[in-house]
Image (tube, grey):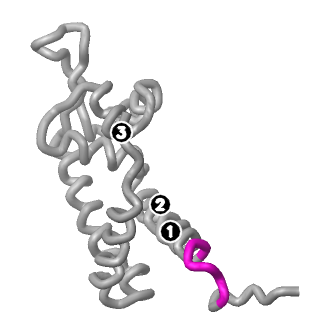
Amino acid sequence: MTSDSMDEWPTGRLLSTAARLVEHSWEDILRSQNMTHAGLICLHTIADRPASQRDIAKVSRVTDQTISRTIDRLERAGYVTRETDPLDERRKRVAITEPGRAIYRRLLTLEKEDAALTAAVGDVGPLREQLLLLVRSLGLPPRD
């Protein structure tokens, strides 16, 4: 029988476990603000300028149908509006509203001030640098 001490876990297992725990913590923060991860990505995509639903889906790496449901929720919450694209009346452009911009800024602040992560590791700077190095060296999957 082998020991299941975390001290003996392979690095990949530690990274996977840490990623899941951080993700769960972040999901709790999002839920407390009545937001989803997909909704935050959508707001991020349109924070500087409106975009079409298709463009938002592409950036988010999801289908048009999936992003449509996310946009529906954001629109019901008053965080986005949909308007006809003046260049192509068949398309809708999604724009962030002032309440949407306010919740987006609040979530960015909460993300940067993640109390659970800071409590666990203290100065997250060195960890962040190592994670950036890892992600850059392994590469992100290409966008379609």
Could you tell me which residue is drawn at 12 percent across and 43 percent down? Answer: 48
Give how far apart the Cα atoms at labels 1 and 2 are. 12 Å
Reading the chain from its start, which is encountered first: label 1 or label 3? 1
The magenta stretch is 8-13
Residue that numbered label 2 is attached to? 27
| Amino acid type shown at disc 3 | Arg
How packed is label 3: few (under 14 Cα within 10 Å), some, or many (20 or more)? few
Res 30 → quadrant: bottom left
Q: Amino acid at mark 1?
A: Ala
When the figure is inspected, residue 103 is found, relative to residue 96, above or below; the finding is below
Q: Give the camera-side residue of 106 and 108.
A: 108
Q: Examine the rendered structure and indicate whether residue 37 appears above or below residue 114.
A: above
Q: Pinpoint residue 103: horizontal percent, then vertical percent.
A: 25, 54
Above or below, 107 against 57 in this view is below
Callout 3 secondary element: loop
Q: Residue at (41%, 36%) from the top-left corner?
A: 70
